[in-house]
Amino acid sequence: MADSRIHRRSVLKGIRALGVGGTLAALVGLARSVQVAPTPVSVSPKRIMLVEKHDMNRQLLSDYLVFYGFQILSLARGYGFFQGLADFQPNLILFDFMLPDINGFTLLEQLQRSSQWGHIPVIVVSGVNLRAERERAQSLGVRLYLVKPVDLNDLRQAIQKELGSSAGSIPLWQKDLSWENVGEDLSRLSES
């Protein structure tokens, strides 16, 4: 019970620190504290496979999406891509096709030809802003091609559009807290 109170206190402090124009760094810190919170049994989070070669980008995107209640499998390279699909069964793939070990277009071609995995929506997030690359990606079934740096709200809205409007619309901390009891919880915490 005390752990739950401490967790709620840190989340509430993090929420106040974020404010309306909060920084991504504060958001990432809050997301990390929320990752340890159990997801309610009644919620079945959508699964996103994140393929991004840059460690920092991968971690920031992963933290941000976990903050909004998604389950994430992140890969730094194409190796293990199809095994990850089989094991994780993602609802969506967030993909940077510039990978260190394989041409991402090769993976997209294999994905599109697959009767088992070809239906999974793919959103590309890339640093390459060439029309030829965009057109090739679209010809391989990519639903959306976003160029880095990406506005995280735009990305989340695109994911919501692909997965259904309610997916990822409420941060995880709101799912775990009852706002009617927040005042009571803070009063009890200040007394203890």
Image (tube, rainbow, N blue to C red):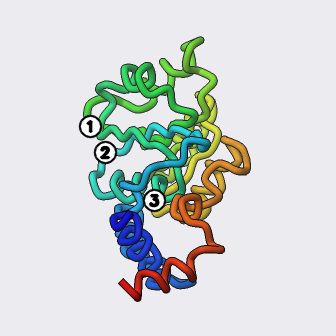
Q: Is residue 136 left or right of residue 54?
A: right
Q: Which numbered dot is residue 64?
A: 3
Q: Position of residue 153 (x, y in %)?
A: 59, 64
Near mark 3 (Cα within 10 A), the count class, few <14, some 14-19 or many ≥20, is: many
- Please tell me whether residue 83 is drawn above or below residue 173 in the rendered image: above
The residue depicted at 53 percent of the width and 52 percent of the height is: 69
The residue depicted at 36 percent of the width and 30 percent of the height is: 103
Who is closer to the viewer here, 101 or 35? 35
Q: Quadrant of the N terminus?
A: bottom left
- Quick one: SS at disc 1? loop
Residue type marked 3: Tyr
- Quick one: SS at disc 3? helix
Dot 2 and dot 1 residues touching (CB under 8 Å) = yes
Q: Earlier in the sequence, mark 2 or mark 1?
A: 2
Q: Quadrant of the C terminus?
A: bottom left
Q: Earlier in the sequence, mark 3 or mark 2?
A: 2
- Please tell me whether residue 61 is drawn above or below residue 119 in the rendered image: below
The residue depicted at 52 percent of the width and 41 percent of the height is: 133
Cα separation, mark 3 vs mark 2, equals 17 Å
Dot 1 and dot 3 residues touching (CB under 8 Å) = no
Q: Is residue 170 left or right of residue 152?
A: right
Near mark 2 (Cα within 10 A), the count class, few <14, some 14-19 or many ≥20, is: many
Near mark 1 (Cα within 10 A), the count class, few <14, some 14-19 or many ≥20, is: some
